[in-house]
Image: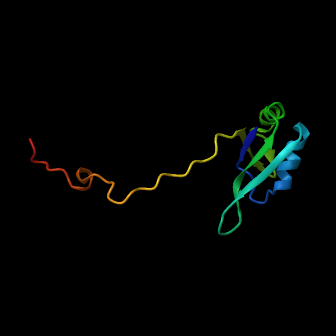
Amino acid sequence: MNIFVSSLNFRARREDLEKLFAPFGEVSSARIITDKVTHRSKGYGFVEMSEEEGMKAIEALNGSEHMGRTINVAVATSERTPRPQAEAGSQSEAASEPENSNAE
């Protein structure tokens, strides 16, 4: 099960997430999401563990305090899908021209 953890302290590291979730079972993986340019934490991450253990961890940890912050813990939704790219000229001409207020 993939678990989403948000409102993390920006100093939290992967090891901190592993230690936080370890009392509930084996942590398959833990990762903190970082900014591509600055490499600083974005304040959220993901933990993977078994379904049963994950549900227990979510119930126990959601709304709890970790490193001075109240964290949110929930089942992660599916992976983020890429945003569709706008095609050149795809905007309709009616949308780009002002409406004629004199039309009947």
> Which residue is at the front of the view, 65 or 96?
96
> Which residue is at the front of the view, 65 or 100?
100
Give me the residue at 74% from left, 51% from top.
8
Q: Quadrant of residue 33?
A: bottom right
Give me the residue at 47% from left, 52% from top.
84
Residue 12, position as x, y percentages in the image: 79, 56
* Depicted 25 relative to depicted 39: above or below: above
Q: In which quarter of the image is residue 77?
A: top right
Is residue 87 shown left or right of residue 14? left
Residue 23, position as x, y percentages in the image: 91, 40
Q: In the picture, which quadrant includes the N terminus?
A: top right
Is residue 20 shown left or right of residue 38? right
Q: In which quarter of the image is residue 86?
A: bottom left
Residue 99, position as x, y percentages in the image: 18, 50
Of all residues shown, which one is farthest toward the right? 23
Q: In the picture, which quadrant includes the C terminus?
A: top left
Give me the residue at 71% from left, 64% from top.
40
Residue 56, position as x, y percentages in the image: 82, 32
Count how many numbered circles sit on residues in the image. Answer: 0
* Depicted 82 relative to depicted 23: above or below: below
Q: Which colour scheme is used?
A: rainbow
Give me the residue at 84% from left, 34% from top.
53
